[in-house]
Structure formats: C-alpha cells, structure tokens
Amino acid sequence: MRLWAEGAAGEARVEPSARSTCPFWQTLTRYWRSYRARNPGAKPRPDPPAVLHALLRPTEASRTALAGRRVVAFSASASPESFARTLESIVRTSGCICAHYAYPDHAHIPDGELRWLLVQARESGAVLVSTAKDAVRLPRWALAEVLRLDVEVV
C-alpha cells in the first residue's frame, strides 16, 4: 500500500471512530511521531513516499459464508490473481471457483454485464462473489445478489 505523505497524521482520511483500533492508523501515527521527534519543525516531504506494508486476510464472516461453495468471481483490481488465490484458499475443501472474470483496475461494470455474470453463476450452480472494493461500486439491485469478500488488516 502506498501513501504519499502530505502533512500531519491527522490528514490521513481514516474515520475518527476507527482510529483507535485501525492497525494502519496506529502505524501511521507512530511513523509521524517518530519523524517529528527526529526532525523538529520539519514538514514531511512528499518525495519519496512513505511505503507501508500490510497483510490482508478474509474476515471470519467471509470465510464462513464462502467455505465449500461453488463461486463465480469477478474483480476490477490491479492484482486479480491475489483475489483468486484468496478465494481458492477458502473454497478449496469442497467447493470450487467455476470462473473468475478480471476487469481493469477500478473499471465500472455496466448493469448488463452484471446481469450476465449473475446468469453465469446461476447456470453453474454457484454464487457470484466480488471484492469488497468492487462491491461498493455496485448498483443497489446487485448488492443482494453478490457476496463480497471482506478483508481485515493484520
């Protein structure tokens, strides 16, 4: 994950209610406190960027909802193979990934395409699954039809 340092840690766009429990926020806060202690009065430079690494894993609810199911997956992310590996690790015991449709990062998926994906899932006896990132861009009618793979930062 890449974060361009623009100023104080308070400028990071993290919801106030999540700040005390979010590992990303805690790491960012420690970084800026350490930076300010070493460089009193200095403003952070945007070049080079601060690079933070985080491990994402599926939530327990997502693992339970998908375990052993047949799935048709779609994603519009920069690394669709990572999404496929994560799904495979969840469904491998008694389910399968019938198909995985990868779209360009941040691609808008038209309603007609979503309806086609749902037909593909139904014909395969599977559920349609997307990343949480892609699910936020789905139209309301599709939210009830698509399971999303939620992840947590560890």
Image (cartoon, rainbow, N blue to C red):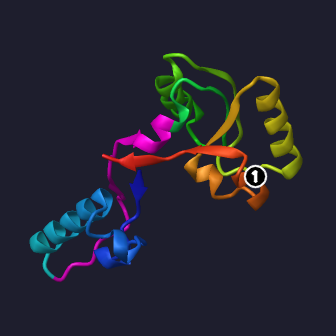
> Where does the image place residue 47, in percent across and percent down from the top left?
37, 62
Indicate the position of residue 15 as horizontal and vertical percent values: 41, 73
Q: Is residue 31 visible?
A: yes
104 left or right, relative to 47: right
Q: Nearer the viewer, residue 50 or 103?
A: 103
Residue at horizontal 16%, vertical 74%? 36
* Span of residues in magenta: 41-64
* Residue visible at 55% across and 37% down in the picture: 79
Residue 146 belongs to magenta span? no
Q: Which residue is mark 1?
A: 142
Left or right: residue 19 compared with residue 61 = left
The image shows residue 94, relative to residue 23, as above or below, that is: above
All told, the count of numbered labels is: 1
Q: Is residue 77 left or right of residue 108?
A: left
Where 73 sits versus 106, above or below?
Answer: above
Magenta span contains residue 45: yes
Residue 60: horizontal and vertical position, in percent? 40, 41
Q: Which residue is found at the position 59% from the left and 34% from the top?
A: 80
